[in-house]
Amino acid sequence: MVQRADERRGCNLLCVSLSVLLLPSLLTDYVDSAPGAGDLRRRGAAGESSELHSAVKSGNRAEVERLLDEGANVEAKPFEMYSAPPLHFAALAGDLELVRLLLDRGASVDSKELRHGSTALHVAASRGHSEVVQHLLQRGAEVNVKNNERGHTPLHEAARGGHPDVVTVLLAEGADLEARDLAVDATALHVAAKAGNIEAFASLLNVTSAEVRASLIFAKDKDGKTAEDHWPEVQEVGWYKQLKVEL
């Protein structure tokens, strides 16, 4: 019997769908049965150890030191660890002690994770870990570095997360208040407004120069919107109304 064209297409699509669903498990079964499979799983992508990442995530300083002494790669970026080096996980947890240790043992302070291009400073700023942010800056971290995902600087991340203490630290170390992201040409003030983070919003405007404040307040993103356009409610806040009167 001659198979109709639409039936053949349906069969082909089914076969492709099944292969997509089954391939990951087939590969896993193959790897699990291969010689040295346990070591391969531990070492992750490109033969890089993820054991160090696990030790950092658990906050186990003694294990981190042991692994480093045995030659673990302090810059390893295995896929199963979000393609990020161990330093990012220490920064994420706000573990200042481990951040110091990893930097002392050769971690690059400006190393970027491979998925979004964020540095440890982006990560610490986004989570509000002001002491870690301060230490990373003291160790030479680039304060105005942009990630690849949206072109955010650490100041954008602190504004989005609503962390006024981090905003203050970054500004004291030279963060550019007028830096624009790559996604919508937004300043950190735009980002704070969109997130409704009043304390971060206020910290960004706590600058001595009235000219800079005016530039921030009236700056427009690529959609032609100012920060207050994204957050009309802020216009009713007493200190903000007074600030605009004084401009």
Image (cartoon, grey):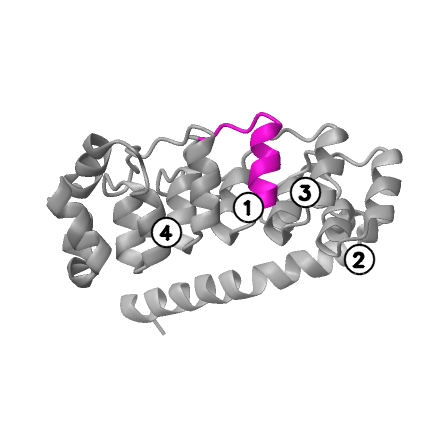
The amino acid on which the numbered mark 4 sits, given as a three-letter code, is Ala
The amino acid on which the numbered mark 3 sits, given as a three-letter code, is Pro
**Separation of residues labelled 2 and 4 (CA atoms):** 53 Å
Which sits earlier in the primary sequence, circle 2 or circle 4? 2
Secondary structure beneath dot 1 equals: helix
Residue occupying the point 15% across, 58% down: 235
Mark 2 or 3: in front is 3
Residue occupying the point 28% across, 42% down: 183
Circle 1 Cα neighbour tier, 10 Å, few/some/many (<14 / 14–19 / ≥20): many
Secondary structure beneath dot 3 equals: helix
Task: Give the magenta-colored segment's residue range.
Answer: 130-143
Q: Is residue 201 magenta?
A: no
Q: Nearer the viewer, residue 221 or 22?
A: 221
Mark 3 or 1: in front is 1
Q: Does residue 74 sit above or below 241 in this rendering?
A: above
Instruction: Say which residue label 2 marks.
Output: 33
Q: Is residue 233 left or right of residue 146?
A: left
Residue occupying the point 66% across, 47% down: 90
Which sits earlier in the primary sequence, circle 4 or circle 1? 1
Instruction: Say which residue label 1 marks.
Output: 130
Secondary structure beneath dot 4 equals: helix
